[in-house]
């Protein structure tokens, strides 16, 4: 299929590139034209077919997706689905099974499995009984078999079964019609099929295929059921319709969150006048913001929050999905007369109306496998979801520090030059990244030896500065018999197959390419072994990995990805498993990096595509954003949506990937991202260089300050990541996670929390000298981390800002560990002394934690080599105690400074008791600002000690 590019065409391509570089130097502003010529040049040289129009017409609307069209219009007066209660079987403690019937098509029977799970969670599975084709059930997502708990059947009559389980959970299963109501603490929170939209398309024979005339079977022959065409792409649909729709309704809630990835609001909008939110992993070129289009990853998980409860619904399904969201009012007057109270405090208003968010979920295939999390607190829900899908393991310390990336750092001299720039300008840095151009013609696991003749030496040299490197490794494999990886995979039959059984071939960066079928465990293992030092020549223990383009991106495929009828291992169509593909690649990469260190060193992987469970192995970034203020602003809601759905190690490209940020935008982006979990600057190949020192001394200083702030707070970040591994609580949080009853925070997306200690309000507008900050929480107090000015909670304040300002506030009641000594890289600072910032609340109390380990191995798990301290300030005493007495970690780190904010008076005497030793440290007090600073001698971070103020 691939024609070789003729020398003449290549020559014209070179001319285009030459023209591009000349124009770039002479005319800075005409970015669009430059990109056009550049792209044309690349196309001609590399023989890449043009990426069709780079606008949203490349991607389907619901109307252009036959199953979405069918499901969206399905709205019967009453549901034809009924549960046959007489069929109930108790298969285990906590597992009930029923038959579900469609009364309009009685020959089709469904099995409904109901599992009551530990931690107030319920699982409901609905599948066809004896389908003519087996339906796909998602693999690789759950961390194990969910643990069942006993259910008490508290009511059972002809039409209803009620069960209570775990701490405060209750379900009510209504038979005719099928409806499932869920309660937490006896508050009615969720309802399934109360809008009658449950609609399960069973597998069927194609009308006419058994000799009967097609007209006899009209409803099985709707438009798009048996084939469908989008633009020039034909989807053969060999198995016909198979979609499932269901309504899940959140009662007495006004806000729902989650279902990433979309460049849209954090509190999800009503889709009344737009397309539904789409879940289908796609490489969308220059994505638009404020719309429900699909992006690179999918998490079919939604949370709802109000002042009484936080709940969640997760539908484990990897097919293409669409979700409608609607804000409704529900009249409760004659509803459920048998139940007295279920709406919490709002139940008795005059018109018997409560708010409701109705959601309509539609997936193209698979089964219904719904998990319902009944909270009732935000932290309960974080725990419930991550108990099933896993938490983010504590990353290596350097991975949460600052990363410098660009498409591309061109050669070894360029990399050394960038490293020297950071040295010369005294800006901390932990990692330098290499994008696709470092390879030999986009053959991953190889190097362009003219530009990178000695990659091991380069990595060793960076290691002298305490720095790591990351190289990119994409899933497309260049079709080239001379490329060993390709030749081997080809001969082993390891590539995904077209519907006719031949190896699927498509276009990506290297030109004609093929893709490995990670769904086959043998291929998955083989791929992970490519990361061994032996197989990946030029890699060292200081090299880590970036998996990009793994939706996967196929330039000439339908919607720039795999065709739906492509076939994976086990005979599953891409239709069934699409959203899992990227995750399998980065899981295999993780296994490979783990294996190469014999399980000793924590891997680091960044992925663009993701699914539920990605958090266990990979960090995620928001893909190809742009250097616009609106994209800087959008990063917060996008990151919050990922955070609350378990993907906690996340960031957006600093500066914006496409286009050139001006100095102001770049500085503001550095400042905002200094307080977001993954902190990396990255830029497109067509942008001007933008290392931190290229914008004048003033801006260099501002960027340095922002990055230094990040390093100052690394002990706090690291402690939060450890908490995430243990409890599933992400480090970056919406305000409502810490202030669940403060209704002013439910739609907040201009500010966020780091742990429960810092409130961050990034400046995301070009020309402002004031921002309006809402301080959450009644009776709370907040301290500006720069000026220490106090602000009261439950109040909005106008804050003056200049270019130095990063509006960040420490919550009164928190204690935050910091490292104030300046270092070039985080790993060099592990044993540095610690400063504790104690911010007192209205009762003059505070608490916090500090976690420390070697920053890179698994010894914290296997050998208990870590320190985990708890600090509490109460009754004028600050105590340091151990959270885990079995833990040991050798360090000479000590507490060099304690800063107490909001302390009412200058203490006459300050003593520190540690064991039988007593010390009298120096202290100073500022009356106007109420700051008490205590200096050395300080105790070791490993010791128990008490500071007494009298
Ligand atoms: C189930 O019933 C038993 C016996 O009546 C009772 O002790 C237990 O607390 C009940 N459990 C739940 C979750 O309601
Ligand atoms: C904050 O609240 C405290 C206690 O209610 C009050 O004394 C103080 O005046 C308030 N400060 C401001 C700036 O409103």
Image (spheres, rainbow, N blue to C red):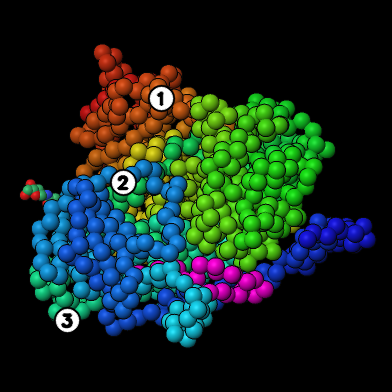
Which residue is found at the position 47% from the left and 72% from the top?
Answer: 205
Residue 707's spot in the image, x, y percent?
A: 56, 43
| Residue 922, visible in the rendered structure | yes
Q: Which residue is mark 3?
A: 351
Front residue (pair 616, 903): 616
Residues in magenta? Answer: 226-246
Front residue (pair 726, 510): 510
Label 1 SS: helix
Quarter of the rendering containing residue 684: bottom right
Quarter of the rendering containing residue 132: bottom left
Q: CA distance from mark 2 to mark 3?
A: 42 Å
With 645 as the anchor, is 580 left or right in this view?
Answer: right
Q: Which mark is residue 862?
A: 1
Q: Earlier in the sequence, mark 1 or mark 3?
A: 3
Front residue (pair 611, 625): 611
Q: Is residue 233 magenta?
A: yes
Q: Which residue is mark 2?
A: 146
Residue 682's spot in the image, x, y percent?
A: 64, 50
Which residue is found at the position 28% from the left and 76% from the top?
Answer: 103
Which residue is found at the position 33% from the left and 76% from the top?
Answer: 105
């Amino acid at each position: 299929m691939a024609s070789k590019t003729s020398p003449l065409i290549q020559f014209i391509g070179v001319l285009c590139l030459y023209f591009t570089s000349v124009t770039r130097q002479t005319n800075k502003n005409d970015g669009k034209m430059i990109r056009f010529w550049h792209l044309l040049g690349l196309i001609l040289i590399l023989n890449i077919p043009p990426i069709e129009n780079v606008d949203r017409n490349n991607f389907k609307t619901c109307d252009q997706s036959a199953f979405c069209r069918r499901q969206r219009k399905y709205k019967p007066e009453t549901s034809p689905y009924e549960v046959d209660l007489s069929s109930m079987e108790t298969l285990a403690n906590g597992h009930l099974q029923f038959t579900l019937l469609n009364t309009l098509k009685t020959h089709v029977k469904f099995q409904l499995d109901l599992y009551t799970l530990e931690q107030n969670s319920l699982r409901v599975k609905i599948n066809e009984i004896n389908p003519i084709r087996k339906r796909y059930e998602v693999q690789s997502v759950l961390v194990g078999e969910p643990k069942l708990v006993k259910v008490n059947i508290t009511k059972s009559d002809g039409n209803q079964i009620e069960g209570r389980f775990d701490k405060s959970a209750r379900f009510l299963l209504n038979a005719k019609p099928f409806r499932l109501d869920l309660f937490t603490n006896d508050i009615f929170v969720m309802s399934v099929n109360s809008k009658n939209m449950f609609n399960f398309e069973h597998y069927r024979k194609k009308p006419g295929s058994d000799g009967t005339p097609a007209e006899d079977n009209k409803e099985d022959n709707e438009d798009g059921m048996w084939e469908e065409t989008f633009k020039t792409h034909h989807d053969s649909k060999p198995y016909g319709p198979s979609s499932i729709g269901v309504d899940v309704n959140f009662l007495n809630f006004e806000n729902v969150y989650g279902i990433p990835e979309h460049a849209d609001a954090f509190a999800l909008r009503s889709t009344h006048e737009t397309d539904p939110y789409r879940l289908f992993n796609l490489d969308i070129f220059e994505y638009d913001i404020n719309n429900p289009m699909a992006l690179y990853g999918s998490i079919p998980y939604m949370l709802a929050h109000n002042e009484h409860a936080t709940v969640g619904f997760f539908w484990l399904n990897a097919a293409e999905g669409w979700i409608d969201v609607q804000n409704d009012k529900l009249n409760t007057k004659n509803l459920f007369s048998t139940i007295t109270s279920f709406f919490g405090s709002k139940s008795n208003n005059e018109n018997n109306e409560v708010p409701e968010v109705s959601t309509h979920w539609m997936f193209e295939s698979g089964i219904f496998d719904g998990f319902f999390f009944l909270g009732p607190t935000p932290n309960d829900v974080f725990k419930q979801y991550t108990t099933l899908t896993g938490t983010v393991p504590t990353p290596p310390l350097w991975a949460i520090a600052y990363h410098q990336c660009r498409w591309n750092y061109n050669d070894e001299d360029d990399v050394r030059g960038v490293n020297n720039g950071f040295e010369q300008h005294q800006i901390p840095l932990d990692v330098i990244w290499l994008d696709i151009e470092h390879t030999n013609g986009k053959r991953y696991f190889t190097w362009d030896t003219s530009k990178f003749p000695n990659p091991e030496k380069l990595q060793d040299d960076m290691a002298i500065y305490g720095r790591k490197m990351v190289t990119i490794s994409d899933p497309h494999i260049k079709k080239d018999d001379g490329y060993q990886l390709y030749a081997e995979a080809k001969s082993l039959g390891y590539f995904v197959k077209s519907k006719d059984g031949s190896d699927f071939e498509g276009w990506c960066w290297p030109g004609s390419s093929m893709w490995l079928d990670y769904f086959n465990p043998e291929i998955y293992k083989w791929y992970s072994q490519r990361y061994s030092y032996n197989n990946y020549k030029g890699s060292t223990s200081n090299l880590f990995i970036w998996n990009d383009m793994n939706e996967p991106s196929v330039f000439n495929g339908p919607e720039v990805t795999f065709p739906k009828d492509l076939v994976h291992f086990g005979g599953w169509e891409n239709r069934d498993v699409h959203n899992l593909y990227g995750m399998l690649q980065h899981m295999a990469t993780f296994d490979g990096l783990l294996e190469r260190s014999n399980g000793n060193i924590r891997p680091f992987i960044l992925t663009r595509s993701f699914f539920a469970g990605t958090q266990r192995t990979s960090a995620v970034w928001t893909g190809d954003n742009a250097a616009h203020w609106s994209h800087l602003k959008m990063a917060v809601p996008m990151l919050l949506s990922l955070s609350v759905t378990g993907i906690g190690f996340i960031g957006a490209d600093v500066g914006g990937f496409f286009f050139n940020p001006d100095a102001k935008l770049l500085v503001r982006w550095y400042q905002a991202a200094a307080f977001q979990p993954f902190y990396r600057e990255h830029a497109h190949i067509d942008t001007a260089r933008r290392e931190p020192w290229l914008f004048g001394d003033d801006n260099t200083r501002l960027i340095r300050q922002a990055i230094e702030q990040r390093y100052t707070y690394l002990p706090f970040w690291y402690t939060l990541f450890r908490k995430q591994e243990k409890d599933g609580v992400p480090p970056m949080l919406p305000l409502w996670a810490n202030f669940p009853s403060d209704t002013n925070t439910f739609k907040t997306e201009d500010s966020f929390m780091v742990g429960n200690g810092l409130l961050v309000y990034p400046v995301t507008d070009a020309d402002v000298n004031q921002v309006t900050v809402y301080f959450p929480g009644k009776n709370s107090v907040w301290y500006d981390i720069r000026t220490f000015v106090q602000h009261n909670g439950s109040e909005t304040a106008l804050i003056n800002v200049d270019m130095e300002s990063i509006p960040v506030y420490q919550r009164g009641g928190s204690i935050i560990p910091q490292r104030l000594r300046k270092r070039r890289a985080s790993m060099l600072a592990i044993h540095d002394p610690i400063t504790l910032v104690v911010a007192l609340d209205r009762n003059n109390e505070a608490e916090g934690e500090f976690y420390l380990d070697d920053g890179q191995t698994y010894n914290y798990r296997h050998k208990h080599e870590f320190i985990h301290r708890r600090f509490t300030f109460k009754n004028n005493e600050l105590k340091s105690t151990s959270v885990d007495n079995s833990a040991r970690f050798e360090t000479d780190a000590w507490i060099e400074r304690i800063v107490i904010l909001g302390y009412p008076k200058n203490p006459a005497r300050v003593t520190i008791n540690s064991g039988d030793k007593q010390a009298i440290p120096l202290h100073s007090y500022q009356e106007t600002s109420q700051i008490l600073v205590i200096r050395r001698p300080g105790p070791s971070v490993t010791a128990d000690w008490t500071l007494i103020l009298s």
